[in-house]
Amino acid sequence: WAEALGSPASPSFVGAPPAELIEAFETPDFKAQLFRQQTDKLTWQRILLMKPKRLEGRTAGVVVPFYDPDRMCGYDLKTKQRLGPERNTAFFALHLVRQGYVVAAVEAYPYNLLTSEEQAASKGGMGLWRDAAAKLTRQHPRCTGMGKLTHDTRLATYLLAADPQVDAARLGVMGHSLGGKMAFYAGCVDPRLRAIVASDFGLAWDSSNWGDPWYFGAKLKGMRAQGLSHEQLLAVGSKPFFLIAGQYDSQASAGPLLEEARKVRALQGQGDSLVMYDHHAGHQPTWPSLKAAYAWLARQLAMPAPDFAYLDLLAEEQAKVGK
């Protein structure tokens, strides 16, 4: 799997990468520090480190990757204003910090690979992704897009684990869609991440666009011919895994893979820590599915049972705008 993914790291670029503090600020919901972290010799990523307003001692930490930190923290990082309530269910980082976690909301490739000038020059549609995939291939011919996404998510874990208010023995990862792909891979291959929550990312090869050039591209055909399949990562890593299924994941597509992973875990004497909540309601998670996932995550990371009053307020806001 490591060979299939590839990595953009050079032999001299190992361990905790440099991170520069850009700014510190506070919102009505959390305290925050925005960092610029080096991901290899040529690129950087933004990481928003979010902390509860009142935090004493150390607590569990969660990495939340997505296109940009804004769409996970629920705030426009330029204006510091709350984003509209129509996507309240998608603000995983905001949900988690309000439950008492320290959260690292992480920016993803292609936005941390293409310069602002290159992004502006990209053609519409999926041009940005195609340009980023081509640039990655030029820089790191043996690295896939999914390898880049996994590598960068793991690097952000250094920043989270090093914070003095984070218990590095209680780290998890959670993501939706593209972020779900990042959470799945980083969680499966990084031993520091103890629990994984992934939302509707396409666990089965045919459930998502894994063969697009910004993920595995033409390499996927050879991987499938070799018999590589995602239940292997779940079986070997033995990580507690919670799948929020909706559109691209379902009982029909993901269920057989989870069952195969359970069989291997049983042979190893492992308990059943693979959970799927299929809400049958499209791509976005539902409030009941999120509450189930957060209650499960709290048990995995030895956190108090969540108080869902804040989520209920977000649900009411979202219902008012009819989303």
Image: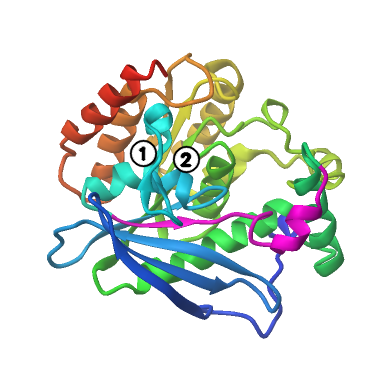
Q: Dot 1: few (<14), some (14–19), or many (≥20) neighbours within 10 Å?
A: few
Between discs 1 and 2, the one toward the N terminus: 2
Q: Amino acid at mark 2?
A: Arg
Q: Residue at x 42, y 70 (%)?
A: 159
Magenta segment includes 220:
no
Instruction: Give the secondary structure at mark 2.
Output: helix
Q: Which disc number belongs to residue 271? A: 1
Task: Give the image location of residue 61, x and y in percent.
Answer: 32, 58
Count residues near mark 2 (Cα–Cα under 10 Å), then give few for <14, some for 14-19, many for 20+: many
Q: Quadrant of residue 217?
A: top right
Q: Quadrant of the N terminus?
A: bottom right
Q: Where does residue 33 sit, x and y in percent of width and height?
A: 36, 67
The vertical placement of 236 against 277, above or below, is below
Q: Secondary structure at mark 1?
A: loop
Q: Which residue is disc 2 drawn over?
A: 265
From the viewer's perspective, is residue 238 above or below residue 260? below
Tell whether 110 sits left or right of 77: right
- Are the two marked residues, 1 and 2, in contact with CB atoms closer than 8 angstroms? yes
Regarding residue 114, the answer to whether it shows in the image is: no
What range of the chain is rendered magenta?
A: 102-123
